[in-house]
Image (cartoon, coloured by chain):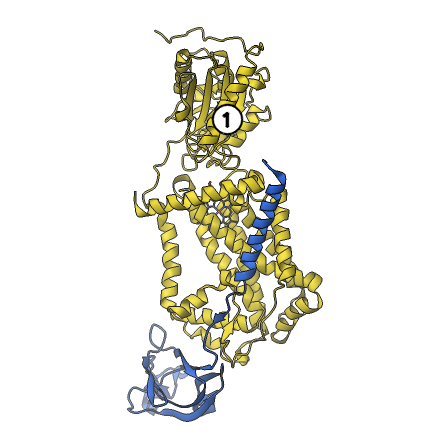
Amino acid sequence: MANRPVAIAGQIVLYGAFAAFIGYFATNPRYQHLEADQALVKLSLAHFGDRECRKRTPEELKQLPPNMRAPMECPRERSPLTIELDIDGKPMYRGVIQATGLSKDGIATVYRRFELASGEHRVAVRMNDNLRQSGFQHVKEDTVTLKPAQILVIDFNPDKGGLFFK
Amino acid sequence: MSVHAALRLAVQTAFRRAENGFDTAFGPTDNPLRHLGALGFFFLWVLVASGLYLYIVVDTSVVGVYRSIGDLTRDQWYFGGILRSLHRYATDAFIIVMMLHLVREWAYDRYSGFRLYSWATGIPLIWLAYMSGIGGYWIVWDRLAQFSAVATMEMFDWFSIFNQATVRNFLSAETINDRFFTFLVFLHIGIPLLLILGLWAHVHRISRVDALPARRLGWGSLLCLLALALARPAVSDLPADLGQVALDTRIDWFVLFVHPLAYATSEGFAWSLLLGGTVLLFALPLLPHTRRAPVAEVDPPNCNGCRRCYVDCPYGAVTMEPHPYKPRHQIAVVDAANCAGCGICVGACPSSTPFRSNEKLVTGIDMPQQPIDVLRHALEERLTHLSGLTKIVVFGCESGADVSRLAAQDTAAFTLICAGMLPPSFVEYALRAGADGVLITGCRPDGCPFRFGNHWLEQRLSHRREPHLRTQVPALRVRQAWAGPTDEKALEEALHQFRRDLEMHAGEATHLAPFHRRTIPHGQ
Ligand code: HEM
Ligand code: SF4
Ligand code: SF4
């Protein structure tokens, strides 16, 4: 090597630059995901749509082998879900969600996120889970106060009385 | 020139400049840019070592994971904390050298033909590296982990390939349990293991893999990361809280860049970029590129099975098999798919010596595009026409500095495919056939596109590798001046210096006895 001291100085500078490069971008610049006063509403639910089931008559039941005598006859296919979400009167989401699975017998899921300013909001969700019936069987409307950074989840659970916020 | 070729050339020039600059500071053996793959392996071993310790001390329960990692930084900063920081920074370093290695291979047009295998097996490694890195950040289970987990799941849900929206698992603390962390740790060990397996596949066809940096480069890199770990210890963010969104976070841009990208554009856009980029990398070798060189050919009568070509081939393209008709002898067999067409085997073959009297020089293994016989004829022919006080023969190669411009009344210049193709006996032959000196050049040390060409030749000339230059050849009359494509001025200067030195010793009786083949046909 032509010049030891210069070479060593060069190495120090280059190693230093490598360390500085890693050290900086390992945490910088800060990533501003949302503005400081914002909150999130997550519409996130998973629900089995209804099936059109029919009660079997006693005669029909008798004709079936004993191990298959289910009182109801249900098709595999499930109804899609129709969901609407309004925030402060503005329509934020309108969707028809198909049941999953090849024979449409699975669960229907939706996940959407909405960024809002924190503060008071009027949130209204409506869901129809049976195509044969018009209107919405499940409705939830409430005024919520969102703190900055808060996540409000809109979910559905029949055991908790249908649609709920948390 | 296509846009792609122009871009590649520009990046290649930038790389070459940087490499030459780094040579001044580090020297070729410790030049990080010349050993990016080896550095990648090195950082991976640092990751494995520091990761083992973290694995032992991290408590993989929901309540324990955040605390046990934080404790490392707080109570054990002098050891566990340093290892934790090393683990993080070695990841970043790994990703940087991996990407540089990729860009460098592309810039030097090293991704098609016999290198297609290395290229194609390299691409999945990028995905495995990122999966390991991103998963690692989740284990900390702080706000950053939560942010990355949710962002990743939102990306996967974009495909809706899973029946459930997977991101629903990250909506409330109830769905996060101890099993989740055990699973994360399992993945964070399993995926790096796959990466190591993939790396083995990536390099196993190459012989003598440059899989560890030279000692000084290794220590330098480790100290560099250690200094960083001390100056900026890795710390956790606030603990994860699924009821709150992380408004702003300190993210590791090397590993987690995809999240800001997806949020700034869309999940679909981010996926198209990632998947499109991957497809493009796979497709690159299909785009126009340099034509594949003809491969080495073995001549059974002239192969005695000495295995030198087998030992020296940088791509493991030679195997030894029983000779078809020489009992108890082996024969070299070339695997065309692996052969780079570099000619290094020709330089290794003892049958390549020009002192053989046959009119046609046929060696054991030869390159159809530049047979050794043609080189001998050209050398003999040029030597008879050289005139002047000090006649010099220059041997150079296609990838190094252009030697054809050195040709003059008193200088003959020959360009070989690779410097490693030159049988050392040709040097002696040139001196006995009328040359006063032989100047040997080729790529800078550790700069050979065929990995070992200049290195083997240098060892053969200094009697450290077979076939070596015979010791009666006076050192004064042989000079090495390794020079890359941008070093032509330096090479010219080296030639002048060599000539001056030879002229200074002109009076000394250091000439070898002349040798003329019995069947000298030239002039016929
Ligand atoms: C994951 C990190 C990687 C590591 C640690 C690594 C390591 C290596 C090593 C040690 C070599 C042998 C170099 C030598 O001995 O001369 C090599 C060769 C090669 N790598 Fe990688 N590699 C990685 C990723 C990649 C990627 C992502 C690509 C491109 C898609 C790639 C493309 C190549 C090519 C084309 C060669 C062949 C070079 C030649 O034959 O001259 N590698 N790699
Ligand atoms: S030409 Fe190069 S790659 Fe091919 S067999 Fe000879 S040494 Fe190996
Ligand atoms: S170096 Fe030449 S003689 Fe030796 S095995 Fe190879 S081809 Fe045969």
* Above or below for A65 versus B347: below
In the image, the chain rendered in yellow is B
Nearest to the observer: residue B74 or residue B344: B74
Nearest to the observer: residue B426 or residue B168: B426
Nearest to the observer: residue B322 or residue B75: B75
Residue B3 visible somewhere in the drawing: yes
The location of residue B41, given as percent across then percent down, is 56, 49
* Above or below for B426 versus B164: above
Q: Which residue is mark 1?
A: B494
**Where, quadrant-wise, is the C terminus of chain B in this rendering?**
top left
> What residue is drawn where x is 66% and y is 67%?
B73
* Above or below for B506 versus B251: above
The location of residue B232, given as percent across then percent down, is 62, 62
> What residue is drawn where x is 59% and y is 46%?
A11
Residue B311 visible somewhere in the drawing: no
Number of numbered markers: 1
Quarter of the figure with residue B162: bottom left
Please rate how many residues cluster around mark 1, counting C-alpha atoms within 10 Å: few if below 14, some from 14 to 19, many from 20.
Answer: some
Q: Colour of chain A?
A: blue
Secondary structure beneath dot 1 equals helix
The location of residue B362, given as percent across then percent down, is 42, 18
**Would the CB of label 1 be found within 8 Å of ligand 1?**
no
Nearest to the observer: residue A48 or residue B471: B471
**Where, quadrant-wise, is the N terminus of chain B in this rendering?**
top left
Q: Specify whether A27 is left or right of B488.
A: right
The location of residue B255, given as percent across then percent down, is 50, 61
Q: Amino acid at mark 1?
A: Ala
* Above or below for A145 versus B448: below
Chain of residue at mark 1: B
